[in-house]
Amino acid sequence: MKKPVLVVISGPSGVGKTTIIKALLSRRDDVIFSVSCTTRPKRPGEVHGRDYFFITEEEFKSMVEREEFLEWAEVHGYLYGTPRRFIDKAMKEGKNVLLDIDVQGAMKVMETFKEGVFIFIAPPSVKALEERLRKRKTESEDKIRRRLEDAKWELGFIEKFQYLIINEELDRAIYELDSIITAEAKRVKRLLDEVERYKKEVLQGEGS
Ligand code: 5GP
């Protein structure tokens, strides 16, 4: 079996992560998305179980106590966590899993999944980020301010990641993410079973 890839994507709020990830998932059926739990209120258009599992703070805390999260963090004033069970099951089945989590979460996953692929998506400028957040109209003014302050702090983590995508042009960013995953999935260390089978087939009959 191929060794699956765990792809972790981080980047400031409003950078376009969700749009890029949705486009990627629609063009690749070998990557599945890990749906997080959050205490943040649902935005219009979001669906429970598809975008997030929207749960109460009480529910979240009891999941923390039961150690059901691979990682969790407080982000922009709400709690967010990655359910451990889904990832374990998907990876056992050989599926590539993609996580969209904040930098604190990414740092924690780096400790447990050394083989993970860590990608930072950055805006072309903080000004561009501000414009995007305002255009999105999903957050109030004070929430936008907070997300912009957090963004400057998050940009300080870029060097901890293996890949950087600057979302200047959407199609280009999607192409770059797609290419990184393709390349990572083709690493010989993830294909050892296939390599063995390939060599057996190719070398069979050699010299006869
Ligand atoms: P939003 O509220 O805009 O959907 O997400 C806010 C931030 O929370 C984003 O940076 C997103 O990557 C992060 N986030 C989403 N799910 C998780 C999670 O399970 N764990 C952590 N640590 N961050 C998450």
Image (tube, grey):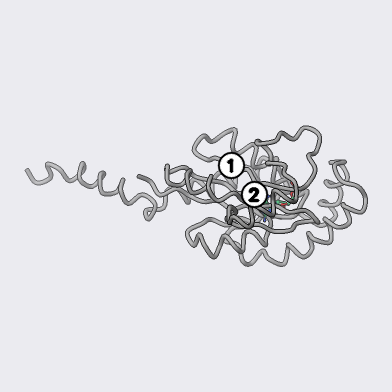
**Secondary structure found at label 2:** strand
Other residues around mark 2 within 10 Å, as few (<14) / some (14–19) / many (≥20): many
Left or right: residue 77 compared with residue 11:
right
Asked where in the image residue 21 lies, by quadrant, the reply is: top right
Q: In the figure, 97 relative to 70: above or below? A: above
Please give the label number shown on residue 100: 2
Q: Report the front residue among 85 and 34.
A: 85
The quadrant in which residue 94 appears is top left
Q: Residues within 10 Å of mark 1 (few under 14, many from 20)?
A: some
Circle 1 sits on which residue? Answer: 33
The alpha-carbon separation of the residues under discs 2 and 1 comes to 8 Å
Residue at the image point whose x is 85% and y is 42% from the top: 138
Tell me whether circle 2 and circle 1 mark residues in contact (CB < 8 Å): yes
Q: Amino acid at mark 2?
A: Asp
Frontmost residue, 45 versus 42: 42
Question: Furthest residue to the right?
Answer: 141
Residue 2, labelled with which disc?
A: none
* Residue lying at 67% horizontally and 42% vertically, measured from the top left: 20
Q: The residue under label 1 is which amino acid type? A: Phe
From the top left corner, tell me how far across and down residue 16 is, in percent: 73, 45
| The residue carrying mark 2 has its beta carbon less than 8 Å from ligand 1 | yes
**Element under label 1?**
strand
Taking depth in this image into account, of 157 and 202 the one nearest to the observer is: 157
Q: Quadrant of the N terminus?
A: top left
Is 113 or 131 nearer to us in this picture? 113
**Rendering coords of residue 14 (x, y %):** 78, 48
